[in-house]
């Protein structure tokens, strides 16, 4: 979601002072009204990476979206789309979509968020075009051993026993965003949001506060719940990747960052 202009606080973009010292890519490259697909992210992201590699620059991929990460480093291709099929599915109630998807793939809940309307619609659209189910596509993707860039990164986790700490950090982080003016930011970009940007975590929930449909406390609780669910899905996704080396959690933030940077440098063969 950092690709979208104007969505700064809620996507935790690096401050401008940091971006002036260290080159950041794939930030502010699209208007929030646009449908910025993973395929387009892959195209622009790989172009930036190839340019950096040719210039012998060091690259660190930062973020939590497993699909977007893999789109950059793995030989992923994306299924075709059909506007007519998509339009018909858009008007179908979610429960009917879920039933249809389960009827063609009872394993879909293991690889897909069945409460995410957009993902369910996309899965059915792909099935109707290619006759490939979500679980079949997931197995095909996981079995692909060819890597575009290898080795690339090492990933640092919070540790599997840090659930209570995670909840506290999520609540604290969201409060910090609110203190920094997130609600005003959401109100400003609300008229500009397209379908994809409007689903951004934090923005989606606060749009209800802006419209007066929900209270701030209700939105806060939903953001924390949704963030915890997202973290769980991210951990599950990345645990399946054998290239990832999980580091033990360090309470001291400086120590944690130094350890991560040091390990990334060792893996990449950086001398300094």
Image: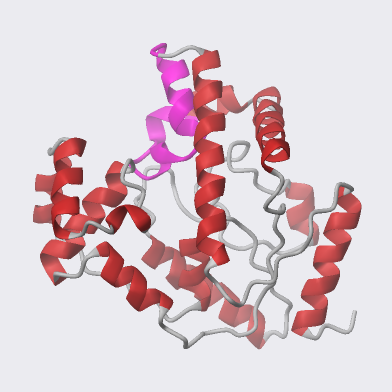
- What secondary structure characterizes most of the magenta part? helix
- Rendered residue at 65%/61% (across/down): 62
The answer to whether residue 1 of the structure is visible from this angle is no
Against 141, residue 129 (above or below) is: above
- Rendered residue at 70%/57% (across/down): 157
Q: How many labels does the image show?
A: 0
Examine the structure image and report whether residue 208 is included in the region drawn in magenta: yes
Can you give x and y, in whole percent of width and height, for residue 130 in the image? Answer: 15, 71
- Rendered residue at 79%/54% (across/down): 249
Span of residues in magenta: 189-213
Q: Would residue 3 appear left or right of 174 to someone viewing this image?
A: left
Q: Which colour scheme is used?
A: secondary structure
Compare residues 144 and 148 and report the one nearer the observer.
Answer: 144
- Rendered residue at 44%/47% (across/down): 31
Q: Would residue 143 appear left or right of 79 to someone viewing this image?
A: right
Against 92, residue 100 (above or below) is: below
Compare residues 62 and 93 and report the one nearer the observer.
Answer: 93
Can you give x and y, in whole percent of width and height, for residue 37 in the image? Answer: 37, 59
Can you give x and y, in whole percent of width and height, for residue 181 in the image? Answer: 65, 25
Can you give x and y, in whole percent of width and height, for residue 162 in the image? Answer: 71, 45
């Amino acid at each position: 979601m950092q690709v979208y202009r104007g969505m700064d606080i809620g996507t935790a973009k690096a401050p401008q002072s940091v971006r002036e010292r260290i080159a950041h890519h794939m930030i502010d490259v699209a208007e929030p009204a646009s449908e910025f697909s993973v395929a387009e992210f892959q195209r622009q992201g790989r172009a930036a990476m190839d340019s950096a590699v040719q210039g012998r620059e060091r690259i660190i991929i930062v973020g939590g979206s497993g699909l977007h990460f893999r789109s950059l480093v793995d030989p992923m291709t994306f299924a075709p789309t059909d506007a007519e099929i998509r339009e018909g599915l858009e008007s179908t109630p979610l429960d009917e979509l879920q039933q249809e998807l389960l009827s063609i793939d009872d394993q879909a809940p293991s690889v897909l968020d069945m409460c995410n309307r957009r993902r369910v619609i996309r899965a059915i659209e792909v099935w109707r075009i290619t006759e490939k189910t979500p679980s079949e596509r997931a197995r095909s993707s996981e079995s692909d051993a060819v890597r575009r860039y290898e080795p690339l990164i090492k990933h640092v986790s919070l540790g599997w026993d840090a659930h209570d700490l995670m909840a506290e950090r999520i609540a604290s982080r969201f409060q910090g965003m609110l203190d920094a003016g997130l609600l005003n930011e959401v109100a400003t970009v609300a008229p500009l949001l397209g379908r994809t940007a409007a689903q951004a975590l934090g923005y989606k929930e606060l749009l209800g506060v802006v419209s007066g449909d929900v209270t701030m406390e209700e939105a806060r609780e939903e953001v924390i719940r949704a963030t915890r669910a997202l973290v769980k899905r991210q951990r599950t996704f990345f645990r399946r990747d054998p290239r990832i080396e999980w580091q033990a959690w360090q309470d001291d933030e400086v120590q944690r960052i130094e350890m991560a940077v040091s390990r990334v440098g060792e893996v990449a063969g950086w001398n300094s």
